[in-house]
Image (cartoon, rainbow, N blue to C red):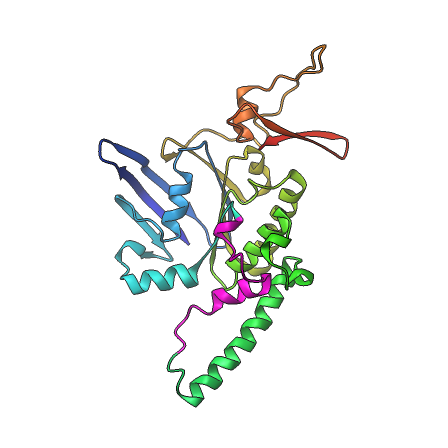
Amino acid sequence: MINCDGLVKIYETDDKKVMALEGLDLTVETGEMLAVIGKSGSGKSTLLNMIGGLETPTAGVLTIDGKDISTYSEAEMVRYRRDKVGFVWQKSAKNLFPYLTVLQNVEAVMMFENSGNTDNLKHREIIKKRKDNNKSYALKLLNAVGLQEHKDKLPAQLSGGEQQRAAIAVALANKPDILLADEPTGAVDTRTADTIYELFHKLNKELGITIIIVTHDMALAGRVDRTVLISDGKVSTEKLKKHPAMEYTVLDKAHRIKLTDEMLEAAGIESNKVRVDVQDGRLVISRI
């Protein structure tokens, strides 16, 4: 499905150049569920944007289904982004129109296609039939992500997890072959994250869709078909452990706990403030 051959990406500013990818090689099979893990600035989001057709490589070749997408015309690239790939971003503001209901958000994606001459009666009938089919399919998607009862709500009326599930339905609206998710659980709690990952598995198995998830979460390594680690703009040869940050620690007399740098990195925690929740008898520490 996807082949990255020596991808290089250089961003230029007035006074310096930043190399985000440094000859990255990666192959993704059709129907595979892949996690791309790495620290901030490692190049993982740049890779996702390239696969999604939002950025072009400075050097190297990116082929999708055997086609070098850098050779696409502007019109071909629009069709590729519209029909071939679906996006799920971390922040719901990038996924959903705030002034549309959940159902309308899903239907809106299906409207971006050539509708022909609307002055012609036959074309108007075709468009009406298409809209009826779109609504039926939109309802089917909302049922698949468990949001059929919330179809008439605005995004602001949903929880963070419900917004992400709505975003997944939107991403699937045009029946893409590839689903790209950039930190899809970064803004939700652990329980909601588990629900979202279970949904990804369900869609992967039932629809055969290729799913690529970019994340800081090292614990995801044991929950997907394959995990690759990106470091310094390349796929690292370092072997990933399923639970690289798991170890024992102790509480001091003031009931304080010390977290190692490895633990903080695995959880994507970069500040000195964290969120602590009690879930099913466990303490869950996550970034704010």
Q: Is residue 110 left or right of residue 159?
A: left
Q: What's drawn in magenta, residue-wise?
A: 92-115
Q: Residue furthest front?
A: 99
Residue 137 x/y as whole percent: 58, 69
Residue 155 x/y as whole percent: 59, 55
Quadrant the N terminus occupies: bottom left
Question: Camera-side residue: 95 or 197?
Answer: 95
Residue in the picture at 32% in, 64% down:
76
Quadrant the C terminus occupies: top right
Residue 180 magenta: no
Q: Residue furthest top?
A: 253
Residue 247 x/y as whole percent: 63, 21
**Res 286 quadrant in image:** top right
Question: Camera-side residue: 135 or 197?
Answer: 135
Residue 182 higher or lower than 77, as above or below: above
Q: Is residue 88 visible?
A: no
Residue 99 magenta: yes
Q: Is residue 220 visible?
A: yes
Residue 181 x/y as whole percent: 50, 48
Residue 153 higher or lower than 38, as above or below: below
Q: Residue furthest right?
A: 281
Q: Residue furthest bottom?
A: 121
Residue 112 higher or lower than 68, as above or below: below
